[in-house]
Image: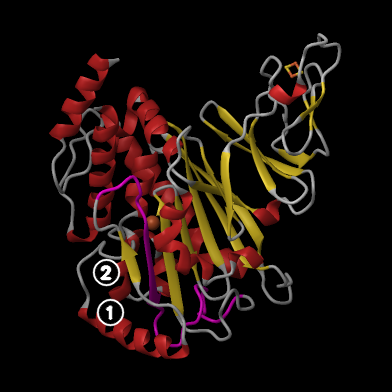
């Protein structure tokens, strides 16, 4: 094991600034396994919204690597358990989603309540104490309706983790939201290749006509993949200043956050203006649904949040697009999107799904294609990392954080 790590440490040290990673990082099974253990299982990740399980006993499964997590609504709260029976280990829930008033193991019918307490086990010896055989809880927090889990045995403090993005998320009232639509985009690409693509907007002009229709070229240059991901645009800075002043006056949050020093976390947040006259991330710029959260009027702003590399929230005043990136194998990633609207908004009257999903559905389908083509080329014996452009600073930043975190975890 130690010897293997030496080999990986050497490889990490060989990576060059302003170049993407070597092939092995995008293809190798052992590196993938290390990534799952050291990244995926160490982060707070939101994997759903509470509105997916509105009634007691409603549940869904979140399967990741060898783990399966049951997310189930109990009496007063949502509970998350490892889907592992305490008897001989069988999965308890075998359907992806459903309703269970009690958790009954299909193997020998041990029965657990919705708090994970074992309440029935037939023909056990007299000294068997059910109290000692509760389901294993998975760390979880329902924050603003977003269900965060952390698979680490020693998770980072949630409050510390959420602190810099908290105000940005709370502004949008996701705790009063419902899922309007959900879709998974299975992508044949390594998770880092998938995120590399998400962290740069160098490809936007060629791949994303819809995104370029909605967002101005100045925004795309400077902020297309988040703050500080491209060269500054004076035009956009002027627009941002002017919008900040106006928005502060009406009392809504402005500003941005990005990590200033290295930590376990990789978070960002910012509020930026759409082009003049545009109020929402829709084809015609008009609102797509009713106002959410703290908004009493449209402020023409767009909120972009990354709580970790595995989650992004992109929010207009009237709907939110929430991403979860789920590594599935060395060359496979599921991109899951939930579109959230106010819980009282009525489909067909206040919003229509096509209008809401238009841009990110089209854009994610296009991203899936370019990531898969990218992975095919990266697999070639002729792949050598090439120099990055000025518009790929976000990718470089993510890569540096990844390598540093990996190195720390291997030493
Ligand atoms: Fe669940 Fe036996 S494995 S009851
Ligand atoms: Fe893209």
Q: What residue span does the magenta drawing correspond to?
A: 262-288
CA neighbours of label 1 inside 10 A, class few (<14), some (14 to 19), many (20+)? many
From where the camera sits, is residue 332 visible? yes
Image point (58%, 36%), residue name: 138
Q: Which residue is mark 2?
A: 221
Q: In the rendered image, which quarter contains the N terminus?
A: top left
From where the camera sits, is residue 205 visible? no
Q: From the viewer's perspective, is 183 left or right of 366? A: right
- Up-down relation of residue 362 to residue 107 (above or below): below
Is 318 within the magenta? no
Image point (77%, 14%), residue name: 128
Helix, strand or loop status at disc 2: helix
Residue reaching furthest to the front: 127
Task: Give the distance between the C-alpha atoms of the residues marked 2 and 1, in whole angstroms.
Answer: 9 Å
Is 279 within the magenta? yes
Q: Quadrant of ligand 2?
A: bottom left
The kind of secondary structure the magenta stretch mainly shows is loop
| Residue 185 locus on image (x, y percent) | 53, 46
Q: Which residue is mark 1?
A: 236
Viewer-proximal residue among 206 and 4: 4
Q: From the viewer's perspective, is 139 left or right of 34? A: right
Q: Earlier in the sequence, mark 2 or mark 1?
A: 2
Helix, strand or loop status at disc 1: helix
């Amino acid at each position: 094991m130690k010897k293997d790590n030496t080999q990986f440490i050497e490889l990490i040290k060989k990576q060059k600034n302003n170049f993407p990673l070597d092939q092995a990082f995008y293809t190798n099974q052992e590196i993938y396994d290390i990534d799952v253990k050291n990244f995926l299982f160490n982060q707070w990740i939101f994997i759903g919204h509470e509105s997916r399980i509105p009634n007691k006993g409603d549940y869904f499964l979140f399967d990741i690597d060898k783990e399966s997590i049951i997310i189930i609504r109990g009496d007063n709260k949502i509970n998350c358990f490892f889907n592992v029976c305490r008897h001989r280990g069988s999965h308890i829930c075998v359907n992806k989603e459903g309703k269970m008033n009690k958790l009954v193991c299909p193997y020998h019918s041990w029965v657990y309540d919705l708090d994970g307490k074992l309440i029935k086990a037939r023909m056990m010896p007299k000294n068997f104490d059910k109290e000692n055989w509760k389901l294993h809880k998975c760390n979880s927090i329902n924050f603003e309706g977003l269900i965060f889990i952390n698979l680490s045995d020693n998770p980072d403090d949630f409050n510390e983790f959420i602190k810099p993005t908290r105000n940005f998320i709370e502004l949008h009232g996701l705790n009063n939201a419902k899922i309007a639509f959900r879709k998974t985009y299975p992508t044949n690409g390594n998770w880092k290749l998938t995120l590399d693509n998400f962290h740069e907007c160098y490809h936007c002009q060629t791949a994303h006509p819809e995104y370029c229709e909605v967002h101005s070229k100045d925004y795309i240059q400077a902020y297309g993949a988040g703050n500080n991901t491209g060269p500054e645009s004076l035009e956009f800075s002027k627009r941002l200043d002017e919008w900040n002043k106006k928005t502060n006056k009406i009392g809504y949050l402005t500003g941005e956050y990005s990590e200033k020093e290295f930590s376990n976390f990789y978070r960002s947040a910012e509020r930026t203006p759409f082009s003049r006259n545009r109020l929402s991330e829709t084809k015609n710029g008009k609102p797509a649904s009713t106002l959410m959260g703290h908004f009493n009027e449209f402020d023409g702003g767009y909120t972009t949040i990354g709580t970790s590399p595995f989650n992004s929230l992109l929010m207009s005043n009237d709907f939110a697009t929430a991403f979860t990136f789920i590594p599935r194998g060395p060359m496979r990633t599921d991109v899951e999107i939930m579109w959230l609207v106010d819980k009282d908004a009525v489909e067909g009257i206040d919003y229509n799904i096509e209008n809401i999903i238009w841009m990110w559905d089209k854009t994610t389908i296009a991203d899936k294609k370019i990531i898969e083509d990218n992975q095919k080329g990266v697999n070639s014996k002729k792949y050598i990392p090439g120099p990055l452009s000025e518009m790929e600073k976000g990718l470089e930043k993510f890569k540096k954080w990844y390598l540093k975190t990996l190195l720390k975890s291997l030493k």
